[in-house]
Image: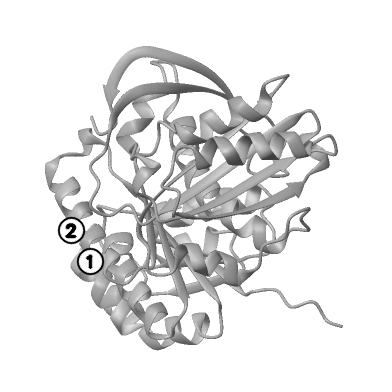
Amino acid sequence: MKELKPRILVLGVGGAGGNAINGMIDSGMEGVEFVAVNTDAQDLISNKASGKIQLGANLTKGLGAGAKHEIGQAAAEESLNDIVDYIKGSNMVFITAGMGGGTGTGASHVIARAAKELNILTVGVVTLPFSFEGPKKMRIALQGIEELKKHLDTNIIVPNQNLFKIINEKTTLKNSFGLSNDVLKSGVQSVTDLMVKPSLVNLDFADVETIMKGMGKAMMGTGEAEGEKRAEEATNAALLNPLIDEYSLRGAKGLLVNITGGTDLTLFEVDEAVNKIRAEVDPEAELIFGAIEDENLTGKIRVSIVATSLDGQEPETKPVVSMIHRLHNRNTGYGNNLTSTLATNQATLNATE
């Protein structure tokens, strides 16, 4: 009998979105189709995605949107038939983009609207600009997100400003954006792995749809640890991800939990991780978890959480757990090129500063 797997698309919209999917491709992410979507023809040529959609060829002549979101929107509307032809028949679409520029801000909501009209589960994983990029760009980004959210089932927003919580004055610009891309990658892969990888505790597309369809604002976190208390430490890290604005899980209506470990992953550790997460949420919340065995993680545990339906909450003020990252040369998975060592910061910071 032929195994049926969902068709999952990851669309990188604009320059930042294209860079994000390049990172996902380099990491060896499996089971999804990558599609670069841009008004800039040169950027599309250099992108590593197998699928490519050029927006607004007549309008922009392949030269980009010039940081004008109105041009990005008009270009996407010009190419709407191409977008629909590509995404129709898929089960799930992730839209990843950097908000505040031209193509990502202007085109993403047009694509999301098309996906929703085709009854495709649609998830946005997008970034907000740094504060130093100015109030105008931030205002455009926030307006773009408000428009995008109208057409998404679930949205995960990563403020780039939060990178300052985990970097120091010697962190290069390239590595800083790499960390931001890793968060976008984790947001996608923590969900898709549960559907496309062989699992000890299997989830299917219907399970994911239960947690993510029509759920609005979401947060996600990933933690990895080793040693005697690895299950507890990995779960704590996932619950306190400093790159995502921190919202209480108490109001979440849906949680998707991915627990990945090596051949030494124990039932006790899965029980410990899931119960620790359950203790943070409403007893009536829908919590679905999957467990994956990955021989590359022998001696370690990775816990990923996506909590949905957080609309109406304000970010909490809580102690920040700083994640000190070391980049590795291995690129076999999203956890392999980013190792997190946890150090609790005694200062209390507001998650949105």
Measured as percent of width and height from the top left, residue 349 is found at 28, 22
* Quadrant of image for the C terminus: top left
Measured as percent of width and height from the top left, residue 238 is found at 52, 35
Task: Verify CB contact (< 8 Å) between mark 2 and mark 1.
Answer: yes
Tell me the residue at 50%/68% (across/down).
210
- Please tell me which residue lies in front, 318 or 121: 318
Q: Secondary structure at mark 1?
A: helix
Q: Secondary structure at mark 2?
A: helix
In this rendering, does residue 225 appear at all? yes
* Quadrant of image for the N terminus: bottom right
Q: Position of 111 compared to 51: left or right?
A: left
Measured as percent of width and height from the top left, residue 263 is found at 85, 39
Tell me the residue at 63%/65% (across/down).
32
Tell me the residue at 78%/44% (across/down).
294
Tell me the residue at 43%/16% (across/down).
170
- From what the image shows, is residue 169 above or below residue 29? above
Q: Position of 35 compared to 80: left or right?
A: right
**Which residue occupies the extreme top position in the image?**
346
Q: Amino acid at mark 1?
A: Glu
Q: Amino acid at mark 2?
A: Gln
- Residue at which label 1 appears: 147
Q: Circle 1: is it few (<14), some (14-19), or many (20+) Cα within 10 Å? A: some
Quarter residue 30 falls in = bottom right
Q: Circle 2: is it few (<14), some (14-19), or many (20+) Cα within 10 Å? A: some
- Residue at which label 2 appears: 143
- Please tell me which residue lies in front, 229 or 20: 229
Distance, label 2 to label 1, CA atoms, is 6 Å
